[in-house]
Image (cartoon, rainbow, N blue to C red):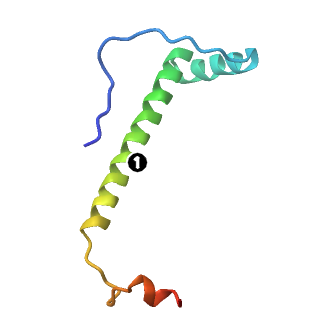
Amino acid sequence: MVHSYTGGMKRNLTVQLDDDVIRRAKVLAAKRGTSVSGLVAAELDRLVADDERYEEAWRQARKAMGDATGRGGRAWQRDELHDR
């Protein structure tokens, strides 16, 4: 199950950015009617949610592969594949 965390106690996080990035982020935030902090928080939230969805999909795929029955017909033995 994927959990999206959007509430609860908020804490400060210090990030060091180039002056030009900060200036451009302020312009972008103003265009979107939010703050730079809001932009960063939304993007980090999106990244974390994407990663959680990926991890869940990977777990489901691994389980499906583990549960799958063989479809190749014959089960080869090591010695049959390598001439000795």
Q: Is residue 30 above or below residue 65?
A: above
Q: Residue at x 39, y 37 (%)?
A: 49
Relative to 4, 14 lies left or right: right
Q: Is residue 48 above or below residue 74?
A: above
Three-letter code for the amino acid on which mark 1 is drawn: Tyr
Q: Residue at x 51, y 17 (%)?
A: 34
Looking at this rendering, what residue extends furthest in the right direction? 20
Rendered location of residue 68, percent (x, y): 26, 72
The front one of 33 and 61 is 61
Observer able to see residue 14: yes
Residue designated by label 1 = 54
Answer with the quarter of the image where residue 25 lies. top right
Relative to 28, 49 lies left or right: left
Rendered location of residue 67, percent (x, y): 24, 67
The front one of 63 and 21 is 63
Q: How many marks?
A: 1
Rendered location of residue 2, percent (x, y): 29, 40
Answer with the quarter of the image where residue 6 lies. top left
